[in-house]
Image: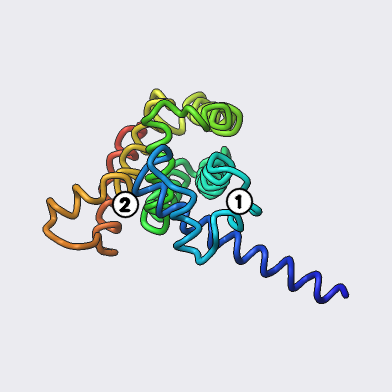
């Protein structure tokens, strides 16, 4: 009995993961307003009614997608929360993690970016609740490093904004980059060179 229940739970988890993965693709391509639950269901091989057994509305599914994006993003942001680490090493690891997110989850990054660009009408409260406290903690760490003369005085808030913009652009604006570079996909070498360039710029801004 327990084994059968476990199998059912595993099957449900796999199906939910398939639904969410397809939802990411549809939301990234069409935005929230343009996305269709019926299209997501059809692409997964379900009826719309069956899909809505797992996710009762488009907004519930959209919020699940954004929750998963934010969970992954915040896990990578946690790299910076090491006040006793060497600032250059901490920032280098943070930039590498953020670029890895852009490379591994470009569609998810675009869904999040589209929500923010539109004014975060669905997800603004979650961003205030989950992102803002962590950013303030990171700013406190920068200020501690400055007070200890470990880095040059810097506006930590805007430095973080700049890092986000530089790293996330490799997902959100990858199409433009590919057009400029004349290739179908960004290569591993592009991300290595991006990491090196962004890291040099950021470390130059904190060097005493």
Q: What residue is shown at x 52% (from left), y 47% (from top)?
A: 65
Please state the horizontal and vertical placement of residue 55, each as a whole percent of the image.
61, 49
Q: Which mark is residue 22?
A: none
- In this rendering, the answer to whether 103 lies above or below 134 is below
In this rendering, does residue 201 appear at all? yes
Q: Which quadrant of the rendered structure holds the C terminus?
A: top left
2 vs 1, front mark: 1
Q: Quadrant of residue 192?
A: bottom left
User: Relative to the observer, which residue lies in front, 125 or 100?
Assistant: 125
State left or right for residue 53 relative to residue 173.
right
Dot 1: element: helix
User: Mark 2 or 1 closer to N-term?
Assistant: 1
Q: Do we see residue 75 in this rendering?
A: no
Q: Residue at x 38, y 37 (%)?
A: 114
Residue 163 x/y as whole percent: 36, 38
Instruction: Name the foreground residue: 96 vs 151.
Output: 96
Residue located 23% across and 62% down the image? 185
141 sits left or right of 110 in the view: right
Residue at horizontal 19 percent and vertical 47 percent from the top: 176
| Circle 1 residues within 10 Å: few <14, some 14–19, many ≥20 | some
- Other residues around mark 2 within 10 Å, as few (<14) / some (14–19) / many (≥20): many
Vertical comparison of 87 with 101: above or below = above
Q: If the image is split into quadrants, where does the N terminus sit?
A: bottom right
CA separation in Å, label 2 and label 1 = 41 Å
Residue 195: numbered disc? 2
| Residue corresponding to mark 1 | 52
């Amino acid at each position: 009995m327990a084994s059968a229940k476990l199998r059912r739970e595993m099957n449900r988890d796999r199906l939910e993961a398939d639904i969410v993965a397809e939802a990411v693709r549809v939301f990234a391509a069409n935005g929230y307003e343009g996305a269709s639950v019926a299209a997501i269901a059809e692409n997964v091989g379900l009826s719309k009614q069956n899909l809505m057994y797992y996710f009762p509305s488009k907004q519930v599914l959209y919020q699940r997608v954004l929750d998963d994006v934010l969970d992954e993003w915040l896990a990578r942001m946690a790299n910076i929360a090491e006040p006793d680490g060497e600032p250059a090493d901490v920032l280098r690891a943070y930039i590498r993690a953020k670029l890895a997110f852009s490379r591994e989850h470009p569609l998810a990054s675009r869904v999040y970016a589209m929500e923010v660009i539109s004014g975060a009408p669905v997800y603004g409260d979650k961003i205030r609740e989950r992102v803002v406290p962590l950013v303030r903690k990171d700013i406190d760490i920068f200020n501690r490093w400055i007070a200890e003369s470990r880095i040059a005085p810097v506006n930590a808030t805007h430095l973080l904004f700049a890092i986000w913009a530089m790293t996330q652009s490799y997902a959100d604006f990858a199409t433009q980059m590919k057009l400029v570079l004349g290739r179908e996909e960004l290569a591993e070498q592009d991300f290595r060179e991006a990491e090196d360039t962004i890291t040099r710029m950021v470390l130059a801004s904190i060097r005493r």
